[in-house]
Image (cartoon, helix red, strand yellow):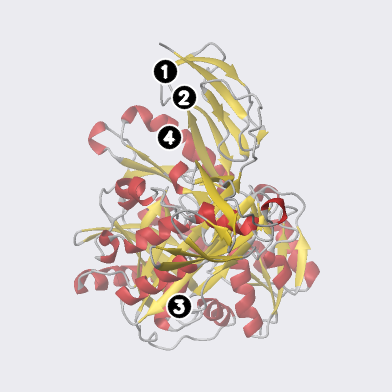
Amino acid sequence: MITSVLVANRGEIACRVVRTCRELGIRTVAVHSDADANALHTRVADTAVRLPGSAPADTYLRGDLIVKAALAAGADAVHPGYGFLSENAGFARAVQDAGLVWIGPPPEAIEAMASKTRAKELLGIEPLRKVTEADLPVLVKAAAGGGGRGMRVVRHLADLDAELAAARAEAASAFGDGEVFVEPYVEGGRHVEVQVLADTHGTVWALGTRDCSLQRRHQKVIEEAPAPGLSAALDEEVRALAVRAARAVRYVGAGTVEFLVAGERAHFLEMNTRLQVEHPVTEAVFGVDLVAEQIRVAEGHALADDPPRARGHAVEARLYAEDPARDWAPQTGRLHRLAVPDAVRLDTGYADGDDIGVHYDPMLAKVVAHAPTRAEAIRKLSGALDRAVIHGPVTNRDLLVRSLRHPEFTAARMDTGFYDRHLPALTEPAPDPHAPLAAALADAHGRSRFGGWRNLPSQPQTKRYLMAGEEHEARYRHGRQGLEADGVRVVHADARLVILDVDGVRRTYEIARYGDQVYVNSTALTALPRFPDPTAQHASGSLLAPMPGTVVRIAENLTEGTPVEAGQPLLWLEAMKMQHKITAPATGTLTELCVVPGQQVEPGALLAVVKEAF
């Protein structure tokens, strides 16, 4: 019987595994990099062991250090979570060779499915070996790992070599394996997957389907179970193929078989030999704890002959610290507050006051709603996200709410091109126009002009804020009855709460301050100084770092004085395990190149200058 588990992972999945272990009475051991020294997963586990360094390659991808940590801490089993070493057969063997229980599939099964090229061959599916114009568009994909890293859609043959190089670099950084392959890219397809669970006694469960079609950069954003709109025949086909794939490699534990569905045809993509990020929607629908089942299977227990019955519908949204309106740029900084209504499930690796760094995936949390019907689950989740309190870096929360309420999604007519079609409309700023006034009134609470009101009308007081990228001015007065403003009636104003009557409708605003940052309900504002700072501005054509990160590559033969075309890739930044392309803003000449490969940059750092040709 397992009594102590080391979780070879970080963030929300580590916290989620720890939670189940605690419910089962199992002690837990966390591992952490230096960047994660005070991370939530280290605080909720019973014991924590340091992995020196911050980069994944030096820490969470070092199987030897993790096995050593497990033995030092007295663990008798290892749970890999997802990502990092979760699908590494060598790591699984090292765990077993050390006399520890591996809570995962046999190394042989991982090897059989670890490479997506070999997995396809196992099922009789050949990858695309030579690409021609007739094959376009194609998808470049990392052979190891997942999560959208090492994936590129190529629509022009001339771009293939560059995208292959970028995919290899990203895959090597994320998974320690730069192998990539090419397959046809199915336009307008849906991403459908099947959760499998198998024991050592020959029983394989197919725990229904999931739809994960809403994706950005080939990484899932919203997932649900069961996949809506599948015909009975197609549903049966994908579940049968998933069981067949599991049996073909004598699979044990939890795994996922993924498909791209177009019409009534399902194209096999891969088998992920681990727990998926989106597993909570399956847990909600089937009433199971998949981590608990993984542990029981690892202990040798048999599954029942038939899986439990599915009930209702579940939807999950991934909350990311990123700005969808700026090419999904990851965000860093202090997460001051994160709270969602109790009606939904929150899986997170952060607590109030934690810092979001640059080294790892920008996912803050998963929010999951379960209800008797799909429509009710969507309404429940979108309402909870709408009311959530998130103070800190920019997130994709508004995008999630609008996505869930989009008619294409509510009617289950979405596909993997959803954000390609709708992103501009979904990211259109829509801040509350009265938020600056509420912030200014809260700031003015307790302060009166010249110590009190006067018989003569006072001059309006002004305060400026930056909101949704634009400057706004709030005007108010100290009157006989207190604070006043044109066009509204101030019902109440103090430092934390402002109530305004706008055209007979009362609106309540909760105020929170963190330095110059002010939050009015869900709207973030930055208080601007009364007099602008006369600092020098960057020259026209300056390219500034949109995020903190590392310069991983500069375009070949790019030097100062080189002519460039608008949109031409100049360099690549890596942040939060993803590479971001920095392109020329206009056609002209590169007059300054301010960085070199390997250089760390902060947001706003000058990367290069392009002088536009006239």
Mark found first going from the N terminus, 4 or 3: 4
Labelled pair 1, 3 in contact (Cβ < 8 Å): no
Amino acid type, label 3: Glu
Label 2, secondary structure: give it.
Answer: loop
Q: Is residue 71 positioned above or below 458 on the image?
A: below
Q: Residues within 10 Å of mark 1 (few under 14, many from 20)?
A: some
Label 4, secondary structure: give it.
Answer: helix
Residue placed under numbered mark 4 in the picture: 163
- For the point 70% across and 82% down, which residue is it? 3
Mark found first going from the N terminus, 4 or 1: 4
Q: Is 266 in front, or is 32?
A: 32
Q: Is 399 in front, or is 501?
A: 501
- For the point 77% across and 63% down, which residue is it? 49
Labelled pair 1, 2 in contact (Cβ < 8 Å): yes
Labelled pair 4, 3 in contact (Cβ < 8 Å): no
Residue placed under numbered mark 2 in the picture: 584
Q: Position of residue 315 (x, y in %)?
A: 39, 70
Residue placed under numbered mark 1 in the picture: 587
Q: CA distance from mark 1 to mark 2?
A: 7 Å
Label 3, secondary structure: give it.
Answer: helix
Mark found first going from the N terminus, 3 or 2: 3
- For the point 47% across and 53% down, which residue is it? 486
Q: Left or right: where does residue 109 sit relative to residue 31? A: left
Q: CA distance from mark 1 to mark 3?
A: 52 Å
- For the point 58% across and 79% down, which residue is it? 295
Q: Residues within 10 Å of mark 2 (few under 14, many from 20)?
A: many
Badge nearest the viewer, 1 or 3? 1
Q: CA distance from mark 4 to mark 3?
A: 37 Å
Amino acid type, label 1: Thr
Residue placed under numbered mark 3 in the picture: 283
Amino acid type, label 2: Ala
